[in-house]
Image: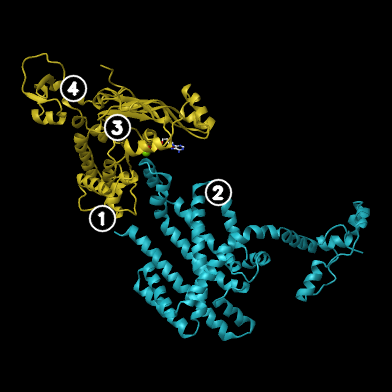
Chain colours: A yellow, B cyan
């Protein structure tokens, strides 16, 4: 599978003389030293990420870790100090003004943390924006705008103004706007962070549901691990502008490579996040107490067994037997690995 | 003996000074004494070493009068060239002012008043404001001031229109570049703080007082400032997140300006227009000194002939005109504001 979007050796340094600072950073100068000695801010350091088509790539990190900076490189709202940004194998850095506009109009759309709707336009006009910018005729704009507004559950609100809607509804408009653009790639910068928890869960479900039929390449930024684990096909963890670990979320959870990530994962509900697939082993017995699907989460399994750790299940995925689950392994997997007191297995 | 003879001698400049001795023109003190009737006293023992005082000691040093005369000479020297450039540039202003003035006066009152009321209604969408405008206009007619009020109004219309036409693009340019802003802001400050009379003087030199553009320019220079400032401010205040979204969806610079920046800056621009209207009205009154027709000339006449009643009625007329212009433009501003924030 070739990546839809690839970042190769991406560096970003904020300051007047950023290109010259890249060498300092490449030879190992840290963020603090760079700021102190050269008055430049290290934004991103040697980012290499491949984003696969049809997957949700989640970029997670604490505030100030460079998430927004990273996602803004994809459509070049920010220009890198060094490195390559490849979209469908083409280097975005080589695009001229109008080709770049074309890319932003037809290949990538974006959803913003603070919604960033046009306050003087109606909901429908906002949703139509990407098409009307491209000069589509009124009928097409109208049809597409209404279609996607209905799809995100905003039928009947077309003629309202954004200020008349709640935050969750405004973000639905933001999502409808991004969908109307009909792009393969969707960039979402903390799209749900400004919403309260219940609406947030709603929106996550809406996104997953849409993704099931649309199969877009989504880049999703969050600082919330639960959200990341719920949405991610591929998880990238950023710290101080560098990638500390990336991969399949379940494997990161089970084998954090860094104390920073251990901190992150230590206080989440592992039973709810981990799935049978991640903790099962190869078949080595012939007695099974039942059959379970590989995508069930561990919380479900505990409820199923009533807490009995002596049971063992055959695991299936799409009808095929893929392994076995010993409930004792399951319990072990629930213990968060903390580097200080558990040696690597 | 003059006060600073000793100093000149001490510096060994005596020969140089005496070489250029000639009959001096009038000193500043003599000039003031002549025009204001102020007395020339014998002065203190140690007068400030001003140009005039130093001149007494050394004929080579010019007097302050030489300075003012020099400025006048310089101005007169470049006048033909300035006129050559400025005259054709500003000529349309004269035509517009004269044309509009003619239109406002030639149109019979029973057409003019309904048209003005329609405009008030269309701009403000407020029945009470329109009714107020109607009563003021009828009052003007009733006290035989309709004609002069229309003269003033026509100048305000033209000057405000031109101020907007020039001011909004300048404001847009200013908002796009910090350098432009740094360069233009001091000029705007100067235009606003400089006493009006000060720039009436070069205007009188430059153009003939019979041309209407002379007061047109005076009014526009003074009144254009707020619309420039507030256009710049309005565009700079547009939410950065919204601008980022506009970039992310690939809007062109023109699309960003017309679809995002100008509409979002509109409340500020309208506030600027409101101020511009008020300032051009204020200036039209002052400009009656350089032959601008209208209510201001009646006030001036009141002052000149010490006719209290004429002056007061004309002054009241100006206030009423100011109030209706303000009400109508404020109502328009409120209407624009409301469509954004209605909940
Ligand atoms: N224009 C800029 N000039 C200088 N430094 C900047 C600029 N933009 C971002 N930075 C710095 O880069 C770092 C990363 O910022 P960024 O906004 O990408 O963080 P983030 O991970 O999105 O944080 P948050 O969760 O708060 O949104 C921060 O240290 C920030 O101060
Ligand atoms: Mg951010």
Write down the residue under mark 3.
A58
Instruction: Give the secondary structure at mark 2.
Output: helix
Kindly identify which chain the residue marked by label 1 belongs to.
A
Looking at the image, in which quadrant does ligand 2 appear? top left
Q: In this view, does B342 lie to the left or right of B32?
A: left
Query: Cα distance, mark 4 to mark 3?
Result: 22 Å
State whether residue B135 is above or below residue A142.
Answer: below
Please name the residue shown 8% across and 28% down the image: A305
Query: Cα distance, mark 4 to mark 2?
Result: 64 Å
Kindly identify which chain the residue marked by label 2 belongs to.
B
Q: How crowded is mark 3: few (under 14 residues within 10 Å), some or many (20 or more)?
A: many
Write down the residue under mark 4.
A279
Q: Is residue A238 left or right of residue B226?
A: left
Asked if residue B203 can be seen in this view, the reply is: yes
* Label ID, residue A159: 1
Q: Disc 4 vs disc 1: Cβ atoms closer than 8 Å? A: no
Kindly identify which chain the residue marked by label 4 belongs to.
A
């Amino acid at each position: 599978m070739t990546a839809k979007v690839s970042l190769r050796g991406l560096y970003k340094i904020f300051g007047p003389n950023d290109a010259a600072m890249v060498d300092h950073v490449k030879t190992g100068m840290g963020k603090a030293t760079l700021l102190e000695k050269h008055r430049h801010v290290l934004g991103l350091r040697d980012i290499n990420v491949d984003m696969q088509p049809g997957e949700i790539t989640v970029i997670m990190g604490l505030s100030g870790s460079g998430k927004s900076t990273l996602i803004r490189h994809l459509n070049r709202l920010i220009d890198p100090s060094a490195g390559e940004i490849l979209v469908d194998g083409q280097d975005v850095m080589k695009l001229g003004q109008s080709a770049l506009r074309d890319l932003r109009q037809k290949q990538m759309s974006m959803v913003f943390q603070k919604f960033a709707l046009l306050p003087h336009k109606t909901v429908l006009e906002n949703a139509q924006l990407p098409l009307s910018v491209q000069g589509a005729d009124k009928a097409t704009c109208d049809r597409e705008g209404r279609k996607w507004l209905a799809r995100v559950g905003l039928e009947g609100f077309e003629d309202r103004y954004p200020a008349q809607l709640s935050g969750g509804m405004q973000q639905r408009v933001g999502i409808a706007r991004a969908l109307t653009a009909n792009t393969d790639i969707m960039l979402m910068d903390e799209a749900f962070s400004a919403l309260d928890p219940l609406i947030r869960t709603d929106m996550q479900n809406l996104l997953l549901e849409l993704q099931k039929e649309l199969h877009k390449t989504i880049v999703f930024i969050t600082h919330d691990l639960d959200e990341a684990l719920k949405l991610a096909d591929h998880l990238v963890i950023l710290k101080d502008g560098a990638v500390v670990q990336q991969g399949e979320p379940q494997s990161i959870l089970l084998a954090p490579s860094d104390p920073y990530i251990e901190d992150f994962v230590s206080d989440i509900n592992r039973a709810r996040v981990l799935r049978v697939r991640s903790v099962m082993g190869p078949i080595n017995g012939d007695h099974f107490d039942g059959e379970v699907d590989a995508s069930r989460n561990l919380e479900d399994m505990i409820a199923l067994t009533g807490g009995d750790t002596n049971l063992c299940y055959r695991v299936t995925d799409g009808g095929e037997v893929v392994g076995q689950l010993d409930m004792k392994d399951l319990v072990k997997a629930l213990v968060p690995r903390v580097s200080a007191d558990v040696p690597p297995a | 003996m003059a006060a600073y003879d000793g100093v000149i001698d001490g510096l060994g400049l005596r020969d140089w000074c005496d070489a250029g001795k000639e009959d001096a023109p009038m000193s500043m003190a003599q000039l003031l004494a002549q025009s204001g009737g102020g007395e020339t006293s014998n002065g203190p023992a140690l007068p400030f070493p001003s140009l005039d005082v130093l001149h007494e000691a050394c004929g080579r040093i010019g007097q302050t009068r030489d300075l003012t005369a020099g400025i006048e000479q310089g101005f007169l020297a470049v006048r033909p060239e300035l006129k050559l450039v400025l005259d054709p540039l500003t000529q349309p202003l004269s035509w517009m002012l004269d044309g509009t003035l003619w239109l406002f006066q030639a149109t019979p009152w029973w057409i003019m008043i309904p048209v003005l009321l329609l405009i008030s209604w269309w701009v403000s969408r407020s029945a009470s404001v329109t009714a107020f405008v109607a009563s003021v206009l009828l009052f003007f007619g009733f006290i035989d001031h309709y004609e002069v009020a229309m003269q003033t109004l026509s100048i305000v219309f033209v000057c405000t229109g031109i101020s907007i036409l020039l001011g909004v693009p300048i404001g847009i340019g200013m908002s796009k570049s910090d350098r432009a802003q740094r360069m233009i802001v001091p000029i705007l400050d100067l235009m606003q703080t400089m006493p009006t009379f000060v720039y009436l003087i070069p205007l009188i030199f430059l153009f003939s007082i019979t041309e209407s553009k002379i007061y047109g320019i005076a009014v526009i220079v003074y009144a254009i400032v707020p619309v420039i400032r507030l256009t710049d401010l309005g565009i700079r205040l547009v939410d950065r997140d919204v601008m980022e979204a506009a970039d992310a969806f690939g809007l062109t610079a023109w699309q960003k300006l017309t679809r995002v920046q100008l509409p979002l800056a509109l409340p500020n621009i309208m506030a600027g227009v409101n101020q511009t209207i008020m300032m051009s009205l204020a200036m039209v009154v002052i400009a009656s000194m350089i032959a601008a027709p209208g209510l201001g000339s009646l006030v001036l006449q009141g002052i000149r002939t010490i006719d209290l009643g004429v002056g007061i009625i004309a002054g009241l007329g100006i206030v009423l005109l100011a109030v209706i212009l303000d009400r109508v433009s404020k109502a328009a501003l409120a209407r624009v504001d409301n469509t954004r924030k209605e909940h």
